[in-house]
């Protein structure tokens, strides 16, 4: 019995060993090029301390710095690549076609935070300690990030998302959707193009037409924009205003902003469009002369910018199915509320809370309740309605269920009250 058991054990071990040998023989263990660790056909690890594993995996240091401490890059996967313009080190690219591009443009210098000196002032200046310049991390198939960026998740979508069409097949197309420095994207088939912009969740997009050559017209689009959720979009690629997307924050599902800044959305199915103002963005615009001395200083600068510019378009939507178009300094809380203006008559300073309320081409209104339709300025309407009611008279105040005011300056207080007495006429006298 023991002999039979030993024979069976030897047989099983032999089968397992032969299987492992077959797997090993099938693997691409061809030594690559370079002085680092390179395994795989066409792989290249250009420096000591660099790892490149996979067919076509390689690290690319453009060189020229003369700096000794150039190492630390890790690339794993077929055609995984790190490309450093001036010997920056420490990048990570894991996954088929994962790509990290560490540039040395104006944006990179703006975010240096005094971690390194540069060889001269002005354009074309180079970091004297390339290993002190931030690099990128890309994990997942077809991922792409620029300096300081992080992208994690599978990216194999080809088609329409938000106001852009993406194609993850080529380096050129991937680059268009994610060229902002310090951008963060965590989630499957989500894309982020904005400086210090962040996307968390699947199938989101923060879009821009910034391509690396048009900093003057698109470089600050989506600065600090944030998405947390799924199926959301902050759309600035097709927006004409150069300040679109700055400071927008979206949390939830299937929300959208377009050509807006300072927009805040929390919920599902909300939409804010054309809620925008021009912003004095010099403080966050990359230049040839560097940027803030620290992260703390930049944060303080952005806070002051937000306050000084009155938060841009500054429209808030909390709830579901709310819609704002051509608004400023406006808030909506509830479900299916709509506030609209026009390019020549922006709806401003409106505050709506409740269900199915509508404000059209009007400003300075406060609405709490349901089914109010406001088309005049300076209306205060608080209370529910048994059916939809249009308020087309300005400067009125109604408080109570089904209360209404039919004349300008009218005040109606209480259940089904109706203010019909015009200004200058004698009203109700409590003493009679």
Image (cartoon, grey):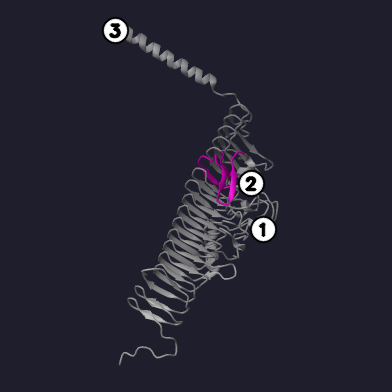
- The residue pinned by badge 1 equals 216
CA gap, disc 1 and disc 3: 84 Å
Q: Where is residue 112 in the image (x, y as percent from the top left)?
A: 59, 52
State which quadrant residue 355 falls in: bottom left
Range covered by the magenta-colored residues:
142-169
- The residue pinned by badge 3 equals 1
Q: Nearer the viewer, residue 226 or 258?
A: 258
Looking at the image, do the residues carrying marks 1 and 2 touch, with CB atoms under 8 Å apart? no
Sequence-first tag of 1 and 3:
3
Q: Which of 401 and 260 is in front in this view?
A: 401
Any part of residue 289 in sight: no
Looking at the image, do the residues carrying marks 1 and 3 touch, with CB atoms under 8 Å apart? no
- The residue pinned by badge 2 equals 103
**Local crowd at mark 3 within 10 Å, few (<14), some, or many (≥20)?**
few
Q: Report if residue 121 lies within the magenta region.
A: no
Q: Position of residue 181 (x, y in %)?
A: 58, 50
Q: Report if residue 163 lies within the magenta region.
A: yes
Sequence-first tag of 2 and 3:
3
**Secondary structure under the numbered disc 1 in the rendered image:** helix
Mark 1 or 3: in front is 1
Q: Nearer the viewer, residue 140 or 100?
A: 140
């Amino acid at each position: 019995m023991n002999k039979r058991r030993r024979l069976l054990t030897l047989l099983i071990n032999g089968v397992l060993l032969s299987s492992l040998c077959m797997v090993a023989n099938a693997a691409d263990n061809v030594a690559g090029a370079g002085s680092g660790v390179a395994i795989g056909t066409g792989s290249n690890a250009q420096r000591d301390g660099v790892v490149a594993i996979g067919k076509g995996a390689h690290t690319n240091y453009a060189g020229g710095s003369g700096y000794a401490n150039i190492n630390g890059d890790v690339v794993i996967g077929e055609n995984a690549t790190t490309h450093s313009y001036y010997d920056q080190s420490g990048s990570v690219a894991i996954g088929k076609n994962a790509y990290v591009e560490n540039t040395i443009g104006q944006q990179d210098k703006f975010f240096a935070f005094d971690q390194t000196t540069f060889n001269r002032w002005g354009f074309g200046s180079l970091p004297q300690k390339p290993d002190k310049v931030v690099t990128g991390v890309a994990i997942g198939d077809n991922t792409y990030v620029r300096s300081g960026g992080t992208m994690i998740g599978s990216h194999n979508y080809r088609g329409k998302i938000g106001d852009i069409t993406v194609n993850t097949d080529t380096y050129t197309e991937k680059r268009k959707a994610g060229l902002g420095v310090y951008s963060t994207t965590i989630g499957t088939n989500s894309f982020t193009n904005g400086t210090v912009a962040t996307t968390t969740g699947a199938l989101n997009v923060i879009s821009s037409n910034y391509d690396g050559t048009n900093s003057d017209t698109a470089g600050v689009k989506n600065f600090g924009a944030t998405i947390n959720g799924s199926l959301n979009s902050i759309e600035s690629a097709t927006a004409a205003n150069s300040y679109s997307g700055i400071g927008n924050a979206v949390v939830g599902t299937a929300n959208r902003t377009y050509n807006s800044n300072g927009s805040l959305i929390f919920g599902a199915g909300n939409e804010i469009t054309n809620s925008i103002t021009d912003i004095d963005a010099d403080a966050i615009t990359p230049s040839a002369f560097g940027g803030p001395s620290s992260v703390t200083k930049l944060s303080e600068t952005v806070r002051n910018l937000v306050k000084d510019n009155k938060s841009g378009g500054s429209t808030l939507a909390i709830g579901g199915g709310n819609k704002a178009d051509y608004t400023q300094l406006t808030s909506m809380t509830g479900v299916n509320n709509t506030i609209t203006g026009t390019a020549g008559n922006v709806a401003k300073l409106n505050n709506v809370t409740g269900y199915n309320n509508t404000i059209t081409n009007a400003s300075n209104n406060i609405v709490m309740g349901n089914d109010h339709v406001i088309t005049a300025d300076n209306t205060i309407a608080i209370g529910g309605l048994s059916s939809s009611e249009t308020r087309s008279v300005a400067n009125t105040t109604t408080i109570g269920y089904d209360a209404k005011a039919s004349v300008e300056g009218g005040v109606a207080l209480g259940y089904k009250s109706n203010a019909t007495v015009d200004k200058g006429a004698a009203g109700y006298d409590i003493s009679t």
